Amino acid sequence: MSKPTILTFKDVVPFDLEAIADGGQAFRWEQTNDGEYLGVIGNAVINARQTGDNLEIVSNLKKENEYKIRDYFDLDRDYSSIEKKLLCFEELQPAVNFCTGNRILHQDPWETTISFIISANNSIRNIKNTIRRLCESYGDQIQFNEKIYYTFPVPERLAGLSEDEIRQTRCGYRAKYIKETSCMIADGKVDIFNLHKLTTKEIRKQLKQLPGVGKKVADCILLFSMRKFDAFPIDVWIKRVLEHIYFSGKQMPISKLQEYAENRFGDLAGFAQQYLFHYTRSCWKEIQNKNN
DNA sequence: TGGCAGGGTCATA
DNA sequence: TATGACCCTGCC
């Protein structure tokens, strides 16, 4: 068994590992100790710890693959500049100040697709448990530091399973969607790994052909795995906070909220969404009370 | 112990 | 375009 590789990324600013790992954009990060997170990215087992402005990684990655970490955590993007632009929107200031350094990960599009199909009408705890069972049952084993970890199963593996076998991960009625989507991707009907070359609108259209993928899930895939930052996924939390901020708490149709946010934030929409989501989910009661 | 909501999607009318 | 069903789990 190879020795763990230790990588230190210095002066990573702004960066908030907790907000990133626990911000609902990825479901395979678990806090192991105070401030320390463990995740599996592709074939890599990653132990991540933030110490001040440094990000320390202990993993089974070879040193020459350091770029994969940079790419995944989006370390080469100037988030200071992005946050500065977002702070020009007065209503975003509390959210950006609450979780400065909340970056958008660059995840695998296939894993992101299945993960967010599972997320529909589901709680984050259940989503994580189902994905864990999916990996433990149908992923490949990785040995690291005398423990066994699991990769996310490849499309062909899930496509070859029966609906009942998938259902054993306790994903409920979503098993049918996972099965059908896996088949479409394994058969090449949707070229999930090359979609990023298209425009946001074109990709969204293709993604929505997949069973279990509607507008919201498609926008999550666009934002969290294809770096389409003009995507703005609207879930219950974002709906609540947009209605609160812009419409005096009045219930609005998603389509109106979508149009409003995309027009207001443009190419920064995805970033705005991610700060708003984490802030709202963490502080909803305080947000409500502030203006009442 | 039972009711309810949870990062929505889909079929139906 | 609006409405309700949908698996399962954890929480109150």
Image: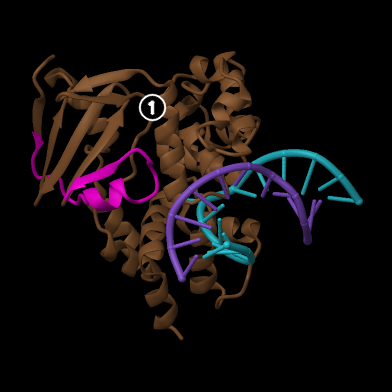
Chain colours: A brown, B cyan, C purple
B12 to the left or right of A142: right
Residue at point 47% right, 27% down?
A110
Q: Residues within 10 Å of mark 1 (few under 14, many from 20)?
A: some
**Residue A192, placed above or below residue A118:** above
Q: Where residue A67 sits in the image (x, y, percent)?
A: 20, 26
Residue extent of the magenta highlight: A8-33
Secondary structure at numbered mark 1: helix
Q: Dividing the picture into quarters, in which one does residue A145 lie?
A: top left
**Residue A146, placed above or below residue A169:** above
Q: Where residue A257 sits in the image (x, y, percent)?
A: 58, 60
Q: Amino acid at mark 1?
A: Glu
Residue at point 29% right, 48% down?
A20
Q: Where residue A45 sits in the image (x, y, percent)?
A: 23, 28
Residue at point 49% right, 16% down?
A157
Q: Is residue A164 magenta?
A: no
Q: Where residue A124 sits in the image (x, y, percent)?
A: 44, 49
Chain of the residue where label 1 is placed in the rendered structure? A
